[in-house]
Amino acid sequence: MKLLKQFGTLGLVGCTMLTSQIALGDDDFNNPEWANSAWYIGAGIGKSRATIDDKRIIRSLMDNGANSVDFRSNDRDTAYKLFMGKQLNQNFALEAGYFDLRKFGFNAVTTPPGILNGQVGFKGISLDLLGQIPLSERLSAYARAGVNYARADAHFTGDRLLAVTNPNPSERKLNPKLGVGIDYKLSEALAVRGEVERYRLNDAIGNRGDVDFYSVNLVYKLGRPATRVPVGNAPQAAPMPASAVMEPTPPPSPMPAPVPSSEKVTFAAEALFDFDRSLVKPEGKANLDDMLNKMQGMNTEVMVTVGHTDSVGTDGYNQKLSLRRAEAVKAYLVSKGIEDTRIYTEGKGKTQPIADNGSKEGRAKNRRVTIEVVGMRTATK
């Protein structure tokens, strides 16, 4: 019951942090594309190492009649954890998890002849806030700070049990934890992490120490960016009263005849998206809004959005990423009032480079989205 109560407390803290929406605008938080891509799950495995207070144990044995103590410890084990996180924005995430740091023990042989064996295991739940800093397009560093609620179960055997007050003690405590790590994106959905964490723990017999956990983790992002954004309800004109009288209007003055027009705009991928993502970022929305403003006066017949990538990655992955980006641009244009049936999307992957993929500058030019607009523009006098 205590574990459930503490988990509820951690959950309440998490809800408070989520509702604060750290550095997150309302438009992004309510965007269906963001909601489909911000959650992730993961698992990690590695080595745990505990600090065993051998001096205190030896002193207790000496106080209970031992003349000398041969002390040997087993302070390492294989540990694992499972976690789920919420990416609050590009730089912050909230993560909750379950961990099992496994068991650590010791063997003490005394003179006069005697033996004391001890073993303690730690497992529990945690809640962390992660701060992330991009180092390159795929690599980022992060640090975590949070709390862990752990249960320590100890067990002692041997003929020197007078050195301990309880042969099978158990304790639950809330303590802080810290960590640092490196995150490398293998693809849009999958990443690998290497990290080290320090758990502050109580060992059930009055000691308070640290367990370090060195782990390798796989992280999988849930969901995929939405392919279209539903158009909001347009404001409806107020109905005309039945008693209203229609007044004749004068004939309109002659207008210039519209002329056919075809315009093509190219955006660098970095101007619309973060690396390896297909969510239109705020700067990208501003760029698309500027394009729409320049289209004022055009009666749009057809729009074609085409995504392109560089040569890094497999053909299949680049094809899917380029199409998702084209569809994300379409979804935003639809949300701004362009009819869904007038916009077509294509993903060309890395098949149509416009620069040399052998250089960083060339790859940046090849990562792009083009928008071609065909319609009738009113001629100006």
Image: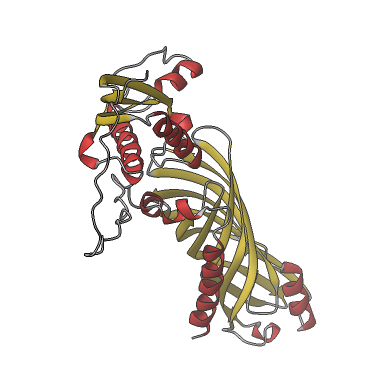
Q: Is residue 333 visible in this depiction of the protein?
A: yes
Q: Position of residue 78 (x, y in %)?
A: 50, 57
Of the 4 image quadrants, the one containing the C terminus is top left
Vertical placement of 354 versus 126: above or below? above
The residue at the point 49 percent across, 39 percent down is 184
Q: Compare residues 117 and 166 and report the one nearer the observer.
A: 166
The residue at the point 25 percent across, 64 percent down is 241
Furthest residue in direction top, as rendered = 356
Q: Position of residue 41 (x, y in %)?
A: 41, 56
Q: Compare residues 69 and 93 and report the one nearer the observer.
A: 93
Q: Image check: 110 left or right of 135?
A: right
Vertical placement of 240 versus 316: above or below? below
Q: Compare residues 22 and 141 and report the one nearer the observer.
A: 22
The total number of labels drawn is 0
Q: Compare residues 143 and 343 and report the one nearer the observer.
A: 343
Q: Position of residue 75 (x, y in %)?
A: 61, 61
Vertical placement of 262 versus 282: above or below? above
Using the rendered view, name the quadrant where residue 9 is placed.
bottom right
Q: Image check: 151 left or right of 246?
A: right
Using the rendered view, name the quadrant where residue 380 is placed.
top left
The residue at the point 51 percent across, 72 percent down is 11
Q: Is residue 273 visible in this depiction of the protein?
A: no
